[in-house]
Image (spheres, grey):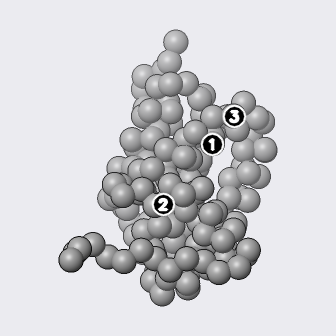
């Protein structure tokens, strides 16, 4: 007899499957180890082509991911009966994008931004943690966006102190 938890119920219907696909960042949320880190990695990879776009496009795309994330993670949380299911990692995608907005996208900034966001997402400095109390998908998404703001500011300060050639 296995001691692992049963798999989550499969989504029924096209809308439920789409919400699950989006909320899990294309399935990254199913990672058996560190799904949040997997979601952040997806966010980093998806930001790569976006980094070459004008800032207005980056901001618009980030807002779309945020609002789609609110919808999709709300649907997933309701279906699973959990406030903030670990499968929902679209919040990590949005937070990673906020971390990297308007900064030079180099291997160094990408790597440091990734690690700074993961650290801020785990620690959740005030008021990020309190944003988890917002209802449904708003709370799922808002705390990671706040962590992304902290990581962005730390990365920006780092770039001011140690400019890249």
Q: Secondary structure at mark 1?
A: helix
Q: Please indicate, yes or no, whether residue 142 appears anywhere in the rendered image.
A: no
Mark 1, Cα crowd under 10 Å, few <14 / some 14-19 / many 20+, is: some
Label 3: which residue? 49
Q: Residue furthest front?
A: 1
Q: Earlier in the sequence, mark 2 or mark 3?
A: 2
Q: What x and y, as percent, mark residue 132?
A: 46, 75
Give the left or right position of residue 55, taking residue 109 as reference.
right
Relative image position of residue 59 (x, y in whole percent): 72, 49
Q: Are marks 1 and 3 in contact (CB under 8 Å)?
A: yes
Residue 131: image location, x then y, percent = 48, 73
Q: Which residue, given by chain and number where applicable, does mark 1 sit on?
A: 46
Give the numbered dot on residue 29: 2
Relative to residue 36, is residue 5 depicted above or below? below
Asked if labels 2 and 1 touch by Cβ distance under 8 angstroms, the answer is no
**Residue 156 drawn at (x, y percent):** 50, 36
Q: State the SS at label 3.
A: helix
Q: CA distance from mark 1 to mark 2?
A: 15 Å
Give above or below for 75 relative to 34.
below
From mark 2 to mark 3, how far is it between C-alphas? 22 Å
Relative to 120, residue 159 above or below: above
Q: Would you place residue 47 above or below residue 10 in this image? A: above
Q: Secondary structure at mark 2?
A: helix
């Amino acid at each position: 007899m296995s001691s692992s938890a049963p798999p989550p119920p499969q989504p029924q219907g096209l809308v439920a499957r789409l919400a699950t696909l989006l909320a899990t960042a294309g399935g990254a949320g199913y990672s058996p180890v560190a799904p949040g880190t997997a979601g952040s990695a997806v966010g980093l990879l998806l930001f790569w082509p976006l980094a070459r776009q004008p800032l207005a496009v980056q901001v618009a795309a980030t807002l779309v991911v945020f609002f789609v994330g609110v919808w999709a993670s709300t649907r997933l949380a309701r279906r699973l009966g959990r406030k903030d299911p670990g499968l929902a990692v679209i919040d990590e995608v949005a937070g990673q994008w906020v971390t990297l907005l308007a900064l030079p996208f180099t291997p160094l900034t990408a790597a440091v931004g990734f690690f700074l966001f993961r650290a801020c997402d785990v620690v959740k400095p005030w008021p990020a943690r309190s944003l988890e109390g917002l209802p449904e998908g708003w709370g799922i998404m808002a705390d990671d966006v706040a962590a992304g703001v902290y990581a962005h500011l730390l990365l920006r300060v780092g770039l001011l102190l140690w400019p890249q050639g």
